[in-house]
Amino acid sequence: MENEVILIGLAGVLASAAPVIFATIGETFAERSGVVNLSVNGTMLLTAMAGFVAAVLTKSVVVGFLVGLIVGALVALLVAFSSITLKLSQVAVGYVLTMTCRDLAYFLGNPYVGIEGVRINVVPIPVLSDIPILGTLLFKQDVMTYLSFILIVVAYVWIFKTRPGMMLQGVGERPAAAHNRGANVNRLRYIYTVLGGALVGISGPMYSLSVKAGWQGTISGLDGIGWIVLAITIFGAWNPLRAAFGAYLFALLQWLGLVLQPVLTGIPSQVLQAAPFPLMILTLLFVNIGDAEWVDRVLAQLPEGTRRAIVRIFRALRSQPPAALGTPFERQ
Amino acid sequence: MQHNEKRWQNLGFQLGAVVLALLLTSLVILAAGAPPLDAYKQLLKGAFGTKMNVADTVVAWVPLLLATSGLLVTFAAGLWNIGVEGQIILGSIFTTGVLKLLQDSPLPPAFIIVLAVLGGMLGGGLWAVLAGVLKTFGGVNEIFGGLGLNFIATSMTIWLIFGPWKRPGVGSMSGTEPFPESLWLPTLPGLRLSIWAVMLGIIALVVIYFLLQGTYFGLKLKAVGNNPRAAFLLGIPTWQYMLLSFFLCGLFAGLAGSLQVVAVYHRLIPSISSGYGYLGLMVAMLINYQAFWVAPVAFFFVALNIGSIQLPIALKLDSSLSGVIQGSLVLAVLVVEGIRHRLLRK
C-alpha cells in the first residue's frame, strides 16, 4: 500500500514536469539557433490564462492548447522580429515582454479568476498500464504527459542526429560558416524562435488545464516557473536529454518539499515555496564555476589526485552556450 | 539645417511610438469590455484627483527615482541588475532590524533614524555585491543570480514577519508591529508625504547625474560597460569596477527600501517594495539610460500605478492595467527606435 502511494506520487512528478519539459525544450530550440527568448515567464502566464479562458468559452481543451500555442508563437515572433530584423537587445525586449505579458495575463484574466474550468483526463494505455510499477508510472498519464516523453526523444534526435539539426547547431555556433554552406541564418532563426515560442505556449495551458487546473490570477503559483525554465535550459547544456533530467529533478524536489512539509514544521510554507530559487543559483554556480580563473589557481595548489577528480566533476557539469547566442548575424 | 530636420524626424518617430502604445492599450481595454477613455480618465483621477492622491503619487515616486538612479550605474557598467528588487527589500529588512534593535535604547530618535537608514543602504549594497560576486567569481549571469536573490529576499521578509519578528500574539500579512511615532520621518500634516524622503530622492538623482556625466570614474565605468576586455587592457580593474557599480546601485536601492520603512509604512510588510525595482528597469530602458529623463518618466510611471488603484472600484478592471500601459510604451519605443535605425541605414 505504502509503495503504491509513493508510485502514484512519482507518476505525479512525471506529469508536473511535463510543462517544464515543453517550455525548456522550446527555449533550447530558440537558443540553439542563437536567440534568447527571455519572455518565457510572461509567456507561460499569458498562455496559461488565454488557454484556460479559450477552453472555458469553447468547452474544448484542444482549442485551449491551440490558443496557447498561437499566443506563444506570436510573442516569440515579436522577439524574433526585434532581435533578428531590428537587431535590438534580446535581453531588453525579452524583459519588457515578460513583464508586459504577465500584467496582460492578470488584467485580461481578471473576470475568469476562480471560475469552474475544464481539464484534460488521464488516459491509461491498454495492456501497457497493467505492467507492474512501470504501468502506473508511465502509462497512466494524460495525453500531454505522453507527448512530453515523445518530445524529449524527438528533440534530441532532431538536434543531434539529423541534417537540419546539424544546420541548427551551425547557425547557433558559427553562423558565418553556416551561411557559407548555404544556410539562410536569419530565416532559420525566425523558424526556431517561433517554434520554440509555440512549445513554451503549450506549456502554459498544461498548467491551467491539467497540473494546476484553473486560473487564480496573481496567486496561481505560476509566476517564477518561467525563470526556472530558463535556468534549466542552461543546466541542460542545450541538450534535450539533460534538460529533461533537470526538469524531472526540479519536479521531484518540489514534490519532496510538499511531502516533507508536515515533517518540517519549523519552516513556513512560503519559504519552502521559494526553495527552488537558491537551488537555481547553486546549480548555475556548479555548471559555470569550473570556468572561473580563480578556481584554476586554487586547483593548481591541490594534490594531483584530488585536482583531477574535481576537474572531472566540473567538466561533467560544465555547460557551454552556443557560441553565437544573443548576437545578431551580419552578412559580410 | 539638416540637424534640425533630423530632430523633427526623431520627434515624429517618438510620437508615433506613443500613439502605437496608446492604440495597443486601448485595444486591450476594449477586450476587457470597458471604454478606454473612461479607463484613462479614472487613471488620471486616481493619480491627481485629490490632494491625497497627488501626495501618494509623490510618495511612490521616491523609491522609483532611487531604484532607477541606482540602475543607471549598473547599466553604465553593462550589467543587467534585475536583482534591484531584492536590494530594495534588503534595505527595508536591515532598516527594520536596526530600528528594532535600537528603539528602546536611550539614543536620540533622529540619530536612530540616521543609523537605520545607513543600515538599510548597507543591506541593499551587500545584497547587490552578492549578485556581483556570483557573476564575477561564479560565472552566474546577473539576471539569474539577481532574480533568484529577489525571490529569496521576498521569502525572507515573510519568514521574518511570521517568525522572529512577528507581532505579539500571532503573525499576520499586515506586517510587523509598527514603530513608535518618534521613529517616523516627519511628514506633511495630514499626508503620508515626507519632504525628507523626496529631498533624498532628488539628491540621489543629482549625484548619479554628475557621477556619470562629469567624473573620471563615470567615464571608466562606461568603458567597462562598452568593452570589458578593452577596458581591462587599458588598465581599468574590471571586476572591481563591476562589483563597485553593483554596490553603488545597491546603496540607492537600499535607501529606497529604507525610506519605505521610516517614511511610509513604519514597519516591515510582505510587499514592501511592490515591484519598484522591476519598474525601474523599464524606466531606464524607456529613457535610453539618460539620467536627465529619470525624474519626469518615473513620475509618469508611478502616476499610472497610483491611478490604477482606482480601476477595480470604478470600472471593475484589474489594476495591472498600469503595467500593460508601461510595458506597451517601452516596447513601442524600443521597436519604433529599431525601425528608425533600420530605415536610416538604408
Image (tube, coloured by chain):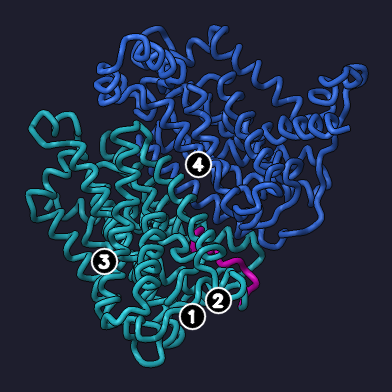
Chain colours: A blue, B cyan
Mark in front: 2 vs 3: 3
What segment carries the magenta color?
B314-324
Tell me if mark 3 has few (under 14), some (14-19) or many (20+) residues whose alpha carbon lies within 10 angstroms of its own: some
Asked whether disc 2 touches disc 1, contact meaning CB atoms under 8 Å apart, the reply is yes
| Residue at 65% across, 16% down | A154
Identify the amino acid type marked 1.
Lys
Q: Is residue A311 left or right of residue A252?
A: left
How much space separates mark 4 and mark 1, taking CA atoms?
A: 33 Å
Q: Using the rendered image, report if marks 1 and 3 lie on a common chain.
A: yes
Q: Quadrant of residue A298?
A: top left
Residue at disc 4, secondary structure: loop
Mark in front: 2 vs 1: 2
Asked whether disc 1 touches disc 3, contact meaning CB atoms under 8 Å apart, the reply is no
Q: Using the rendered image, report if marks 4 and 3 lie on a common chain.
A: no
Residue at disc 2, secondary structure: loop
Q: Using the rendered image, report if marks 2 and 3 lie on a common chain.
A: yes
Q: Which of these two is toward me, B83 or A273?
A: A273
Q: Is residue B318 highlighted in magenta? A: yes
* B129 w.r.t. B231: above or below: below
Mark in front: 4 vs 3: 3
Residue A253 rendering spot, x and y as whole percentages: 63, 36
Residue under label 3 = B118
Checking the image for residue B45, the label placed there is: 1
Residue at disc 1, secondary structure: helix
Of callouts 2 and 1, the N-terminal one: 1
